[in-house]
Image (cartoon, rainbow, N blue to C red):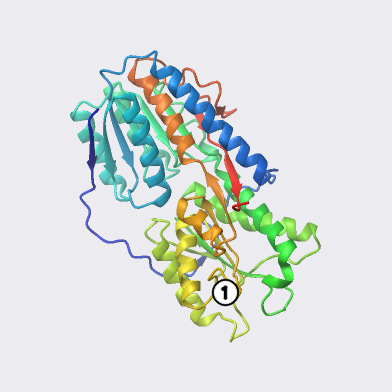
Amino acid sequence: MKKKVVSALLATAMVATMVAGCGTDKKAETTAATEATTDAGSEAASEATSEATDVTEALAEEVDLSSANVAVFYYTFSDTYITSVRTALDAQLDSLGVTYDDYDANNNQTTQNEQIDTALQKGANVLVVNIVTSGSVDASKQIVDKASAAGVPVIFFNRAVEGDEEEGQVLGSYDKCAFVGTDAPEAGHMQGQMIGQYLVDNFDTVDLNGDGKISYAMFMGQLGNVEAIYRTQFAVEDANKVLEDAGKPVLEYFDAGNSDCYQVDQDGAWSATAANNYMNTNLSQYNEAGGNMIELVICNNDGMAEGAISALNDKGYNLGDDSSTMIPVFGVDATDAAKQLIADGKMVGTIKQDAEGMAACISDLVKNAGSGQDVMANTDSYNISENVANKIYIPYAMYTGE
């Protein structure tokens, strides 16, 4: 096995800036809330990972991967969840004994495109791509065209390559193409249900100023990103539905002057730094002393949740003991850091995005592609999209540490 790590040639540090933006430019269509429970979701994710591992072990004994030269392109190495996927996928590729290189685009699509050109020139014959510009048909199609011209398979993962209204335009354009990811709306629906039920159970405690309403902050990972759009929309919509069904008032965004009802990481990095900067500024103006304290924090990912919790800690909140007030914070990914925050009583819950299951599935497709089989061969055990035959969904699951 040979592995290299190739970093992007960008040295600009990513610093999140304050935006008073609320609401997405592209409003996702509301769908029915996903009916899921923590136990059922966790069991499904566990079974999917187990099945993927079984398939991986079985196929490893049957295929010849001696000529496989795999290039794996990450949108950034700095994303905590992506780091988990990279660690798991490196282990999977190591077990296959294939030659592979890891590339860090540092959140720059132009850099990633150049890296793909370089990898192809160096003889890569399987491309695995975590695209930078999520949901962009143009960006995704450029990569597919590069792969098609070289006659090599391309496996996209994690970040959407096309929007719902464009489904199949990219993945249906090349027979050696596939996608491994999640059903984008599902995380938002699950997070919204989790938040709504928590508030129904703890409404009076969360309502710090006793005005009968819950004031919330929303931290969005990236403008235009399909996952971010759905999480931002459905986390609130589904929470509100649970609240209304229980006879409670709907959520109220903390800043009446922000009509979009979110604050977004302007670097598109879904970073703890962005959320921390926002939260520190917010708390200087919205606090218990002023009677307008933010009473709930919703984050598109666990990294942003970490940043928000750090700011709350600095003000004496969410310290994990009886001496401090708990502002409920929710994220997505179930990173190890988030799990620890939940165990420490500093965070309420998150939605598990199964890094190990995703890596195992990608590994299966790499084996197929690297051995000359159809990319989607032997994938019947996976959850495959009803609309696009080469799109595999890895299930989400609620996580509260219980």
Q: Can residue 170 be spotted in the picture?
A: no
| Towards the viewer: 107 or 365 | 365
Q: In the rendered view, does 34 fall on the left or right side of 387? A: right
| Towards the viewer: 309 or 269 | 309
Q: Can residue 400 be spotted in the picture?
A: yes
Residue at image x 39%, y 13%? 62
Residue carrying label 1? 255
Q: In the rendered view, does 196 fall on the left or right side of 93? A: right
Q: Identify the element where label 1 is drawn.
A: loop
Query: 212 above or below 54?
Result: below
Residue at image x 63%, y 51%? 402
> What number of labels is visible?
1
Query: 365 above or below 191?
Result: above
| Towards the viewer: 342 or 240 | 342
Q: In the rendered view, does 135 fall on the left or right side of 323? A: left
- Quarter where residue 344 is shown: bottom right
Percent of width and height locating residue 145: 33, 29
Percent of width and height locating residue 99: 25, 27
Residue at image x 58%, y 76%? 324
| Towards the viewer: 54 or 312 | 54
Q: Residue furthest left?
A: 122
Percent of width and height locating residue 207: 69, 73
Quarter of the image with the N terminus in it:
top left
- Quarter where residue 141 is shown: top left
Q: Residue furthest bottom?
A: 289
Binning the other alpha carbons within 10 Å of mark 1 as few (below 14), some (14 to 19) or many (20 upward) gives: many
Query: 247 above or below 322?
Result: above
The amino acid pointed to by label 1 is Asp
Residue at image x 34%, y 52%? 78
Percent of width and height locating residue 74: 34, 42
